[in-house]
């Protein structure tokens, strides 16, 4: 009897030891990466912010209080002393084919050359990528860059859609642009660069470090290192000065599997910004399609759509959506926009408007200057992310977002983004969505768009505007 009890005890101990070992080996970055001595106590909170955008040459919209995207990225590289860390869904900067047609296409080559030159200045370039093959990343590796590849198909059944830079753990960029020549020439992009802000940048670096540690893995760890935990969140935002204005800020992430302790999910960040809005919610997005496709079936994905309906009906918040009009836009997107607008019919103090940003057509019938924005601005906050508002994006794909909240008016970042939205909303390229009318977007009518299984954000193919240009 005693021998049997001994066997049971030994077996239990062995099982416990096995579980402990499994947990240890499933953790990421057990010791954590050195953060250059930057801590929450000694980091910088007096920061400067610049909005950066790319406006295609044949789009008659002027830069207003913003910096050209290419200039902003080169400025970041000029500031680099130790390290540049980049995550991008695309790497296609080196093109000569389109230089004669799009003179600014050469800006991609210039940016690639600047990245290649970092090694000569003693700056370490690190790239996290979801691409399995890339000639440009191979070229950068040859010039001293360190590249880690993530098997996103195995990890989340999605894609790496994050687009951000971390420079010297002090400066950052986040926005819609990828490392693609089109983002510097033919696509209309918007992002933000923040300087001398090590408190906030340190937290974004932790998202980069999470990607960095997932190389060679085909599963998501069950536990994470404390070095990957979020420092700030919607419950505990960073309080800082941004161009002298009091601001609360934090970064968010997707999908759920990529959110260690205390990290705010993108969908929760969006919900919080919508919930805090008192007067208006303005959204500029490439795609709006509240559907979720898991490969076997398609269902309604109500999270953002439901949030907007609640804000409009119950809190009387004014909603405007500016969605891109391009040939791969799914026809159901117009149905959802019409549905939102129809809620306010014959209702007082209810306002919902939807417009499509419809650029000129090139000679071949394809649109030029697609509005590639991914942001929302309210009377008190701005959210800039890496996703179109499509269900699959948030569930399967990896992305990051930035929330800035300010109560001050004037030159504050939130007010500047609102001014940019107003500029685009009232431009000649903004077309009001008419009832029972499907706009023509590009060479094909939207009503002849892709099948449900191929809607934007589908896990069956990578959704990118590049395929149409």
Image (tube, grey):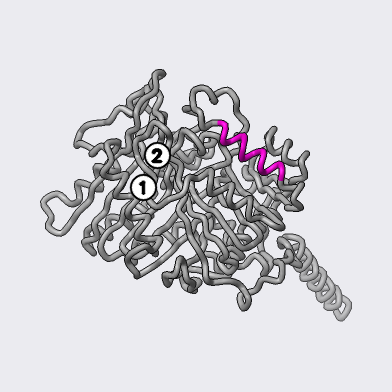
Q: Identify which residue, 448 or 32, lies in the foreground.
A: 32
Question: From the viewer's perspective, is residue 321 above or below residue 5?
Answer: above
Q: Residue sitting at 71 percent across and 49 percent down? A: 125
Q: Residues within 10 Å of mark 2 (few under 14, many from 20)?
A: many
In the rendered image, residue 334 lying in the magenta stretch gets the answer no
Labelled disc at residue 284: 1
Helix, strand or loop status at disc 1: strand
Labelled disc at residue 199: none
Q: Is residue 73 visible?
A: yes
The extreme right residue here reads 3
Q: Identify which residue, 252 or 448, lies in the foreground.
A: 252
Labelled disc at residue 371: 2
Q: Residues within 10 Å of mark 1 (few under 14, many from 20)?
A: many
The extreme top residue here reads 364
Secondary structure that dominates the magenta span: helix
In the rendered image, residue 109 lying in the magenta stretch gets the answer yes
Pointer 1 and pointer 2: residues touching (CB < 8 Å)?
yes
**Residue 454 percent coordinates (x, y):** 46, 33
Q: Residue sitting at 59 percent across and 59 percent down? A: 171
Q: Identify which residue, 454 or 210, lies in the foreground.
A: 210
**Residue 337 percent coordinates (x, y):** 28, 43
Span colored in magenta: 106-117
**Residue 147 percent coordinates (x, y):** 72, 46
Q: Residue sitting at 42 percent across and 45 percent down? A: 373
Q: CA distance from mark 1 to mark 2?
A: 8 Å
């Amino acid at each position: 009897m005693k021998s049997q009890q001994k066997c049971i005890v030994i077996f239990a101990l062995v099982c416990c030891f096995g579980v402990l070992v499994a947990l240890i080996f499933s953790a990421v970055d057990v010791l954590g990466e050195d953060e250059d001595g930057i801590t929450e106590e000694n980091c910088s909170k007096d920061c400067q912010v610049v909005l950066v955008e790319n406006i295609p040459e044949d789009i008659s919209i002027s830069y207003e209080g913003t910096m050209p995207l290419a200039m902003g990225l080169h400025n970041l590289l000029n500031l680099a002393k130790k390290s540049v860390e980049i995550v991008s869904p695309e790497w296609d900067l080196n093109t000569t084919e389109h230089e004669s047609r799009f003179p600014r296409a050469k800006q991609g080559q210039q940016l690639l050359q600047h990245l290649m030159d970092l090694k000569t200045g003693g700056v370490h370039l690190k790239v996290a990528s979801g691409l399995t093959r890339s000639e440009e990343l191979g070229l950068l590796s040859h010039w001293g860059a360190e590249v880690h590849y993530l098997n996103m198909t195995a990890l989340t059944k999605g894609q790496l859609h994050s687009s951000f830079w971390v420079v010297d753990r002090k400066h950052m960029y986040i926005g819609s642009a990828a490392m693609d020549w089109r983002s510097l020439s033919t696509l209309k992009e918007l992002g933000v660069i923040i300087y001398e802000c090590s408190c906030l940048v340190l937290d974004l670096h932790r998202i980069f470090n999470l990607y960095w540690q997932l190389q060679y893995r085909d599963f998501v760890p069950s536990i994470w290192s404390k070095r990957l935990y979020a420092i700030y969140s919607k419950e505990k935002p960073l309080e800082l000065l941004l161009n002298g204005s009091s601001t609360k800020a934090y970064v968010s992430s997707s999908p759920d599997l990529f959110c260690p302790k205390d990290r705010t999910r993108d969908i929760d960040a969006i919900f919080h910004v919508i919930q805090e809005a008192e007067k208006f919610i303005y959204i500029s997005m490439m795609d709006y399609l509240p559907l979720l496709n898991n490969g076997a079936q398609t269902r309604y994905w109500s999270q953002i759509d439901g949030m907007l309906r609640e804000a409009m009906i119950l809190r009387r918040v004014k909603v405007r959506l500016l969605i891109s009009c391009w040939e791969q836009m799914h026809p159901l997107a117009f149905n959802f926009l019409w549905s939102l607008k129809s809620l306010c019919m014959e209702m007082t103090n209810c306002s919902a408007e939807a417009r499509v940003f419809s650029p000129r057509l090139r000679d071949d019938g394809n649109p030029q200057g697609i509005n590639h924005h991914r942001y929302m601005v309210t009377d008190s906050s701005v959210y800039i992310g890496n996703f179109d508002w499509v269900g699959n994006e948030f569930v399967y794909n990896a992305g990051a977002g930035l929330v800035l909240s300010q109560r001050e008016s004037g030159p504050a970042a939130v007010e500047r983004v609102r001014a940019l939205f107003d500029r685009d909303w009232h431009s000649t390229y903004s077309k009001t969505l008419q009832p029972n009318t499907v706009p023509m977007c590009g060479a094909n009518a939207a009503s002849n768009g892709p099948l449900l299984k191929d809607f934007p954000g589908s896990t069956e193919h990578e959704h990118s505007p590049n395929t149409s240009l």
